[in-house]
Amino acid sequence: MLSESRIQDLNQPLLEEHQLQFNFLTDLLARRQVDAGQVVQQLIDFQVAIPSWALGTGGTRFGRFPLGGEPRNLEEKINDVGLLHQLNGSSNSISLHIPWDIPQDIAGLQQQLSEQKLVIDSVNSNTFQDQKDQHYSYKFGSLSNTEAGARQQAIQHNIDCIRHGQALNAKTLTVWLADGSNFPGQQHLRRAYLRTQESLAAIYEAMPSDWNMLIEYKPYEPNFYSTVIPDWGTSYSLCQSLGKNANVLVDLGHHLPNTNIEQIVGRLQQFGRLGGFHFNGSMYGDDDLTTGSTKPFQLFLIFNELVDAARDQTVTNPTVAYMIDASHNVKDPLEDLLQSVENILSAYAKALLVDRTALYEAQEKNDVVRAEEIMRDAFLLDVRPLVAEAYRRAGGALRPVAAYRAAGIREQLIQQRGKLSLSTGL
Ligand code: LRH
Ligand code: MN
Ligand code: MN
């Protein structure tokens, strides 16, 4: 739908100003002994997975306002991620959600993925909704359910997810459980944990040795009194009990207000148990807003922990899976995702620019103000020319959202798929 030359044409009128800004930043950074080209290369190498469930207009439990042209099947979802990747060169993978995305035509999908230079990074299981014809209900939990049959059904579903993922060369299973309770006394808290641990162990056993399991935590919703995996400590203890291929997934929205997420990220890396991220923006909780829209400074501080640990040889954390889990009901989802990726790259670029030698020195001397100023210096620098240059060098658009609009992509999608096309998703 978008040719490379069309993207170049859209870049053309912006090039002169971009070059001016990029050259200025290159000179400025060179004075600080930082090679802008190297930073740009690190940005090009950074890839973040797009969730298949965020490509249609999101909704709330009060309603949904579809804008049309949304993908109706997995092929169309892959196509949309391909478009994003063409525009920014930074979204080369897709997270699937089963059963919303059951792959059917495996050979066809594989061909499409390779043509669009995409991979499937992870498969997410879904035991938070009852599916048609399923024998046991998840009303009172899945992997933690008091009924052995329901637990077994949920275990089997996760194993089926692995099989679906294997067909498309994925290597990661993401588990998020809605399990918990709504009222005091409803659930035996310790036993619910133990049943979950046992169920996860059965899935882990069935998982191929080159696969990873990511365990996501969340303090509330849809259960509002207790959640079986409410926090990183619980995820961490489950991972510890399972083995080295189970690691913690940090969804930025899955924290109570004011939680110091960057510290959690630092801790998990120190323990070698940070498995992945679900990036999104959060104002109150699991809001799934555009990543970086509400708390860009926090996003920068999280990336600061990642960059810091990556440079520390004593840290041996596994490869981290970077994924978005944001979807919105008043934005065009593709524009929303382009914005999320851009904010992620900006936070990463800023973290790469922190003067770490000066920072460590200030920290050692307990020079509080100096340390904070160093962080602010990096955060307040306008790194957009670096991000734009990364897009450009990857064959993408200098301004992906503007290019998306100028190319009339949504209009074309509506023409192809209809005004009222509905997608699966939340
Ligand atoms: C749960 C969650 C989890 C799900 C996704 C759809 O709130 O973050 O990752 O799989 O949303
Ligand atoms: Mn999530
Ligand atoms: Mn969530």
Image: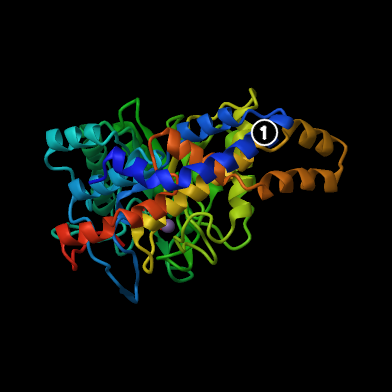
Q: Please name whichever residue, 264 or 22, is drawn nearer the observer in this view of the structure.
A: 22
Residue 399 as seen in the image, left or right of residue 37 = left
What residue type is disc 1 on? Asp
Q: Please name whichever residue, 218 or 28, is drawn nearer the observer in this view of the structure.
A: 28
Image position, residue 179 (x, y; %) = 39, 58
Image position, residue 247 (x, y; %) = 47, 37
Please rate how many residues cluster around mark 1, counting C-alpha atoms within 10 Å: few if below 14, some from 14 to 19, many from 20: some
Q: Height in image: 38 above or below 20? A: above
Residue 316 as seen in the image, left or right of residue 70 = right
Residue 356 as seen in the image, left or right of residue 172 = right
Q: Height in image: 250 above or below 317? A: below
Q: Residue at x 41, y 39 (%)?
A: 90
Give the farthest residue toward the bottom. 62
Image position, residue 259 (x, y; %) = 62, 57
Image position, residue 36 (x, y; %) = 60, 31
Q: Residue at x 60, y 36 (%)?
A: 23
Give the farthest residue toward the top. 313
Q: Please name whichever residue, 59 or 340, is drawn nearer the observer in this view of the structure.
A: 340
Q: Height in image: 25 above or below 405? A: above
Quadrant of residue 336 within the rendered picture: bottom left
Quadrant holding the C terminus: bottom left
Q: Residue at x 20, y 49 (%)?
A: 76
Res 123 visible: no
Q: Residue at x 27, y 67 (%)?
A: 67
Q: Height in image: 190 above or below 414? A: above
**Circle 1 sits on which residue?**
27
Q: How many marks?
A: 1
Mark 1 secondary-structure assignment: helix
